[in-house]
Amino acid sequence: MEKILAVNSIGKFFKDKKVLDQISFDVHKGEIMAILGPNGAGKSTTIRNIMGIMYPDEGSISFHGRKEVPRNKIGYLPEERGLYKNVKVMDILLYLADLKDYPLKKAKERALDYLEKFDLKGKENVSVEELSKGMGQKVQFIASILHEPEMLILDEPFSGLDPVSQELFKEEIRNLANQGTAILLSSHQMNLVEEMADRLFMIHKGKKVIYGTMDEVKEQYANFKCTIKGVNDRSLLDDLPNVQRVEQNEGGTTSVLYLDNEVHPSAWLKNLPEGVNIQELIFDRITLHEIFIQIATGKNLAVEAGDLDA
Amino acid sequence: MRNTWKVARWEIKRNMKNKTFLIGMLSTPVIFIGFMLLGSLFGGSDSENIDPTQVFVNDEVGVIADIERIVEESALDWDIYSTDLSREEMEAELDDRENTAFLLLDHLAVQEGTVSVYLSEGVGPFFQSELRVISPVIQALQLEELGLSEDEMAVVARGITFVDVTPRGSDIGEGAAGDGEGAGAGESDFMERLVPGAFAGFIMVSIVFTGMAIFQSASQEKKDKLAEIILSSLTPSELMQGKIIGYFALGIIQSLVSIVFIVPFLIWRYDFPILEYLFVPELAVLLLIAVLGFLLFAAIFVGIGATMEDITTAGNFQGIVMMLPFSPAIFIGPVLSDPNGLMAQIGTYIPFTSPGVMILRLTMLEEWPWIEVIIGTAILAVSVWLFMKLAGKIFHVGILMYGKNATPGEIWKWLRGS
């Protein structure tokens, strides 16, 4: 796939503290690339460096192989976002499109189409302060895509959205990717990322932790786990083969067994001793959400910084 | 630069569509005119709004023409009529009349030097003093009857006049000359200085007040959380310059709207050729000073505006900086009492006070201290450049700082950094 954006070993210092260290990844045409990490990991700083709001102290960023990143070809929805309060919806959409050098006539047509698509038909002459929070977020999203960007950077696009709007945003983001827009998506909602992203880059304390396609990440990091409901002695479970660690709730009624990546599910299940009390059993892979939490809390022993040859 | 103009256009459009701004823009001249009308209502209404006093003269000695001439020269608000009513008839007439006086000028009056005057209701309290104006006419008649020659009469009738000849700066001699024509020319010179000066002062105050809106606007992007969205399309410098240019244009629009209302009002009310006095070469210098003053305060406001989200959260430091445009007020007293004094000169060289002090001084002085004007303007221009640079540095970092106001320590760090 055609590489649109390349981030090459960028580093950034805030005073003496290195907040980004050797960050490298690419974003390709028509793909959704997720950038994940706990709060303060360096996601927004990375994005601000791409957008030219800050400049990296080390490394470089290129767009179509050129060092100059043309900001009018990128759409950006930052995490901290809002709209001027006392202006009309259409006025602000056209102003933001104008700042991106997009023809106003075309912008107006597209704005009306998108307003209709996002259930905001007839709101173009309404003052922004009269919109609900969800409506405001839709307008911000429209503003970020109105100028037909080649690349779209979305920082927490789903935060504060109701499930219906979430679906609408998801569908539109997927549509844009299908039409060839390169999308860099930052989100804490792991279920959505898992569902949407083609590839992901996980960052922690300014450093790369995981980078690869969703399938590769799952294969390498999302080991199998077995959740058993029923009162069991912890030592019995600890002694089972291929078990990396066991987590039990208070009272020991539910136990989660994290298995190593060499386990063969059916053989392992067949060899479970009769003494194990099983009221209910779930056998699945650990989710992206769990990987994220483990990394953020430093629990994941299996994960070491690695590149999956994305 | 293209982005700068886009921001400027946006700021103009946004404000021109904003009801609060429009109300403010239109109400300024209305308030101005209202205060002037109110002022004349309380101040000058007594003499201006009441009809002239009707003065009926029973002239048995033939001086009515002289009285009419002297009353006209003294610009007294009298309407003079000739009458042949007798004392008794005059007394009888008084009851039916308002603001009317009857004068009986007969030979007895000339001989004894006592003129009988009958006053009706409503004659102003100053009429008695005004009557003194016609006493030379009667004195002349007395002297003539005594048989003095015309020259002798002229010497006696002239009386003694005290003329103030104290030397005052550059005015030496001119004031003492004091003939009618000279005094008129002096007044006209003063108007030639006052009108452009007042105009430049008005423009400056108007754009400084609009400039204060820059402060609100600079924190707007922070408050509405738009800074990152905007800065993903343009640089902080472009945003800052766009705001300054936009609000400068808004200030000019505001001034023009005020002028369109106020100038016709002044012409109608005071009947003097204001436009003739306005468009003199000095206006260019005064406007340059006013514009530099605007740019200086715009830079300060835009910089400080970027360090906080709302004026209500301004700390002491920001509050003090916001007061800077009003600092020329300290110099108003000293400059008025001595426009060339040491305090006036000091005020000219301090960038924050220089625009206000220079405009005030140049309005008052007949001969401009050009060297001081040039040095003052140069200091102002350099300060504008310097403060724009500093504001740029503060704006660059401050605009992206959400959630808290910058401390003076942080601002100092930003100024030293990068």
Image: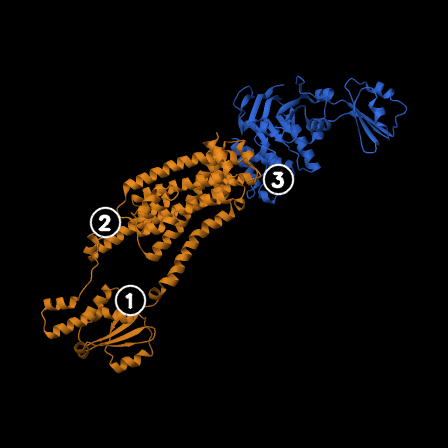
Chain colours: A blue, B orange
Q: Position of residue B403 (x, y in %)?
A: 58, 39
| Disc ID at residue B77 | 1
Q: CA distance from mark 2 to mark 1?
A: 36 Å
Q: Is residue B47 above or below residue B200?
A: below
| Disc ID at residue A136 | 3
Do marks 2 and 1 share a subunit? yes
> Is residue B334 visible to us here?
yes
Do marks 3 and 1 share a subunit? no
Q: Position of residue A43 (x, y in %)?
A: 61, 28
Of the two numbered discs 2 and 1 on the same chain, state the one appearing first in sequence: 1
Check the residue under mark 3 and report the chain it is in: A
Q: Position of residue A285 (x, y in %)?
A: 77, 24
Q: Is residue B108 above or below residue A278?
A: below
Question: How many neighbours does mark 2 have within 10 angstroms: few (below 14), some (14-19), or many (20 or more)?
Answer: few
Front-lying residue, A30 or A242: A242
State the residue lying farthest toward the bottom.
B88
Residue located beneath label 2 in the image: B170
Q: CA distance from mark 3 to mark 1?
A: 70 Å
Q: CA distance from mark 3 to mark 2?
A: 68 Å
What kind of element bears circle 1?
Answer: loop
The amino acid type found where label 2 is placed reads Ser
